[in-house]
Amino acid sequence: MKGRQNAYPFKFIDMAIIGNIIKGVINVTDKLSDDGNPVEEQKRVLKMLLETASKTSFGKHYGFDEMLELDDPRKMFAKKIPYHDYSQLSKAWWNKVIDGEENITWPGNPDYFALSSGTTGKTSKRIPVTDAMISAIKSAGIQQVLALSNFDFPADFFEKEIMMLGSSTDLEERDGHLEGEISGISASNIPFWFKGYYKPGEDIAKIDDWDERVLKIAKQAKNWDIGALSGIPSWMELMLKKVIDYNNLEHIHQIWPNLTVYTSGGVAFDPYEKSFNALLGKPIQIIDTYLASEGFIAFQSRPETSAMKLITDNGIYFEFVPFEPDYVNQDGSLTQDAPSCTLDEVEEDQDYVLIMSTVSGAWRYIIGDTIEFTDVKRAEIKITGRTKFFLNTVGSQLSVNKLNKAVKQLEKELDLQIPEYTLCAKRYDDGFYHTWYLGSEKGDDNTKAANILDEHLKEANKNYRVARGKALEGVKVHFVDPVMFSEWNGANKKKGGQVKMERVMGEDKFAEWEEFVASMS
């Protein structure tokens, strides 16, 4: 048996009426609400998590009842419970949940598991998704919709259809649970009133094969009035290109003239900005979101910044570990003596490893992302990279955020579009070189590109400059067709959904990548 289906009579509801109702609700809610207090909200969330899970095996093992006797249990919580990456939490606890045991890390047993290979490989993680998490994701989505009052869209914007490009909603049943990527789980649980807005619709969304699904979208595109897009940038670009090519268009606004908003997520949008804008006929509003397999973490709530506001009142308790080499192991996990900060202890412009405890029974969980605060009072953040993709082989200490900025500079100087890239600190006979593969349809001057990247990184990063005077010999660049990256993901993981490209690879994985590129050339 595959995914559960629900029928709703939404087609009988006038979308214009619903659109004006939504706009009115947003305006009224905006006038009545305030920004809240993120620190106090986080204290309440932690207390709720401890109370709800106090009778689970995990809660009994770590003494949640004892923590609840304190007015502020945050310090004891951090002291008694170790950091967990997926491997650690699964080995000790979640394997029991997967086997069907109840009340292990959260009351009951979840109906869903989110499959996530992310950027790390072929093997899927199976992350519990409880009913409480489904509700939290829906609530976060409503918060984001309400925040649209800050962007001052007209009422008729809320009558337009929304293209949500994620993984297949045709979830697989396994041992009494349904499993799939979080975007597919979320799309299969959208509210009934949203069904009329949602494209590509249930039938197309169920198609598992990415290329077949995108072809169906391209064929149906002329029948839809899309006002908003939502999905990971790399796959969204490929879908838009397919729609443009299939329908013999110059840009996407020729078929979707009312396209106004793109809700980006999963990765930083900056590397895709130039190539994405090239597919448009006019500027649109970009809104960043942060939805992971472990929960809906943050969204951009105002147009003055591209930073995202942490969702601090909705089933996730956050902690932050300073992103320092002494605290991060080679595999991206944390040393257990690494200090953690609460929301009232963080500072701006400092990289932190994001730690989460959630209503799905994740406890002090290392999601693998690094973030920085751009506004502590508003709890606004930017994703800066991945703990596993921190390039520090010879002391260069480059986060993905710094690599992205270098690529943007390269785009500017060479007038190129480079939506995808990957690199490795690769050892050659004469020492280490940062070896880059850049996805570009027009790039051809490898030497000039290497010099630009090298000079920019030396100027922007002291540690890189020092490394260049020691073991790091220089930069090598190879330009390849951007499609190479999606084909690599298709060969190694799966096309579409939450799958993202590794920005930084180890030497073994990089050797596989280079062999793949050679075979495709």
Image: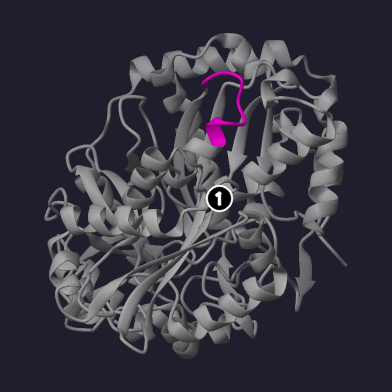
Left or right: residue 59 compared with residue 121:
left
The structure residue drawn at horizontal position 55% and vertical position 36%, both measured from the top left corner, is: 276
Left or right: residue 315 compared with residue 24:
left
Q: Which residue is mark 1?
A: 440
Amino acid type of disc 1? Ser
Residue 15 in percent (x, y) is at 73, 16
Residue 180 makes an appearance in the image: yes
In the image, is residue 234 part of the stretch drawn in magenta? no
Residue 204 in the image: above or below residue 22: below
Disc 1 secondary structure class: loop
Residue 260 in percent (x, y) is at 57, 21
Around disc 1, counting alpha carbons within 10 Å, would you say few (fewer than 14), some (14 to 19), or many (20 or more)? many
Q: Which residue occupies the foreground of this view, 222 or 379?
A: 222
Residue 475 in percent (x, y) is at 34, 67
Q: Which residue occupies the foreground of this view, 299 or 119?
A: 119
Quadrant where the N terminus is found in the figure? bottom right
Residue 350 makes an appearance in the image: no
The image quarter containing residue 236 is top right
The structure residue drawn at horizontal position 63% and vertical position 22%, both measured from the top left corner, is: 259
The structure residue drawn at horizontal position 79% and vertical position 24%, both measured from the top left corner, is: 224
Residue 195 in percent (x, y) is at 74, 33
Q: Which residue occupies the foreground of this view, 215 or 410?
A: 410
Quadrant where the C terminus is found in the figure? bottom right
Report the span colored magenta.
276-283
* Prevailing secondary structure class for the magenta stretch in the rendered image: loop
The structure residue drawn at horizontal position 26% and vertical position 34%, both measured from the top left corner, is: 36
Q: Which residue occupies the foreground of this view, 254 or 97?
A: 254
